[in-house]
Amino acid sequence: MYQSCEKYLNNEELLQFLKSYKEQHGRYFDFESIGKSSLGEDIYLITLTDKECKHHSEKPAFWIDANIHASEVTGTQGALFFVERFLDVKHEQASVHKELMKKMTYYILPRFSPDGARAFFKEANSYRSTPLAVKYDYCDFKRQDIDGDGEITLMRWPDKSGPFKELPGHRGILVPREATDFSMDSDIYYQVVPESVWNNYDGFKKTKNYDFGYDFNRQSPSFFSPEGLQKGAGALPLEFSEIRAVAEAIRARKNVFAANSYHTYGGFVIMTPANVEENKLALEDRLRIKKMGETLSEKTNYSLHSGADDFIYIPGQPLPGTFDEWYYLHLGIVGLTIEFWDVWGKAGMTWERAVEKYETLSEKNMLKLLTWAKENLKREQYFKEWTSFEHPQLGKIEIGGFKTAFFMTNPPVKYLGEEIEKVFNILEKLSGDGKSVNTYVGISVCPRP
Ligand SMILES: [Zn+2]
């Protein structure tokens, strides 16, 4: 069993992993710091190649980046699995992997945002990418692990006009109130927001404003939209040191020809570019992107989507400033985003539109999710019982609800290995068979003589 399948690695454990691989596999493995995070942590890039067969920069290279979003730590594990499997001398494919490393280079960025990951391991679900304070007035709501249990769950308080109610027969489980739920003199309805405090609390305003902080995956220069048009984007492209360092690193490696960006969650393969019409792309590129997406989707059972007209939250508004769109449009690197882990699929839920998965669950889907969770996990793994708490601003409330960090956002550890292995298996296939090499779904890249 690999370390990447057994435990989610925090920043210290990640560095230990990198050091130990460098010590044990010096011929094939190297890592370096490509820059510092906003709060001063190193951002590491792994180079995986056979150093005795040409310099890494002289071979065609495949790029993986992960964990640009603080809570999406499965991506880090997937990136490390890649290293472990490639350097596993006992694995039946070991000779193929060695052959590939003679002819190719793999650049692997396991943790795009070390600040974000550190915050996540301290108090899950606190930030989108980084703990940096957002410099905009509307961010008057700050997620915080106020009961100190190590995870930000939910706060609820009874309210006659609250939009949630308990699912009958299921203690503590909240579902949206129906339009026909009229009992206005009852307090069986709840207001629900993440564990939080408000800045400048006025004793009245209890709604949730945008509170997730900056999003490095809206910070790239292609089709950038500033804060105001795109929340979390900041004022300028590449404004933060993390995205600047990673952008410089991939740009400097001219041999990179294909890339994958690892995210969670949902079980999606999302093709780029989103902001350019498909028929305006070169036919060759279009076919490559499609083939890459289809191969990944078919073997992982993750559904395949286009960032242009399918995987969008607001019709007609594809996401601006994403990293994978930028490396394709500005650097010519063909790639896509993989959203690991689909608890909805495991529970047998279905959807008309992919992004509906991120919305509040209906009663019907909630029942399916609960059934799966009960059959496969212990209740304390996915649910925190509602517990009375004295909130500094709201007074008496309850804290509890789904513990999403290792249930919905990332797989519980017992499912982690299968999840990251199935994506690896496709990548391995896509990156060549060791003989014909240099074939990322038909992209012919000739190693320089
Ligand atoms: Zn993400």
Image: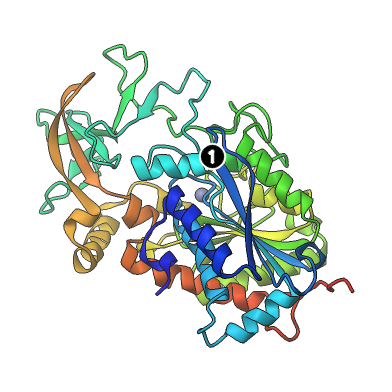
The correct choice, above or below, for 244 with respect to 414 in the image is: above
Q: Which quadrant holds the N terminus? A: bottom left
State the residue at coordinates (29%, 42%). Answer: 151
Task: Choose between 239 and 44: the one closer to the eye.
Answer: 44
Indicate the position of residue 68 as horizontal and vertical percent values.
Answer: 54, 47
Taking the image as shown, residue 202 lies to the left or right of residue 66, namely left
State the residue at coordinates (62%, 86%). Answer: 95
Residue that carries the numbered disc 1 in the rendered image: 41
Taking the image as shown, residue 64 lies to the left or right of residue 73, namely right
Taking the image as shown, residue 271 lies to the left or right of residue 117, namely right
Helix, strand or loop at mark 1:
loop
Disc 1 within 8 angstroms of ligand 1 (CB): no
Taking the image as shown, residue 166 lies to the left or right of residue 63, namely left
Can residue 105 be seen?
yes
Judge the density around disc 1: few (<14), some (14-19), many (≥20) Cα neighbours within 10 Å.
some
Q: Tell me the kind of residue under disc 1.
A: Glu
State the residue at coordinates (90%, 74%). Answer: 449
The quadrant where residue 63 appears: bottom right
Indicate the position of residue 276 as horizontal and vertical percent values.
Answer: 74, 50
Indicate the position of residue 155 as horizontal and vertical percent values.
Answer: 23, 34
Give the residue furthest to the right.
449
Label total for image: 1
Indicate the position of residue 338 as horizontal and vertical percent values.
Answer: 55, 60
Task: Choose between 181 and 106: the one closer to the eye.
Answer: 106
The correct choice, above or below, for 421 with respect to 214 in the image is: below
The correct choice, above or below, for 13 with respect to 78 in the image is: above
State the residue at coordinates (45%, 53%). Answer: 73
The quadrant where residue 397 appears: top left
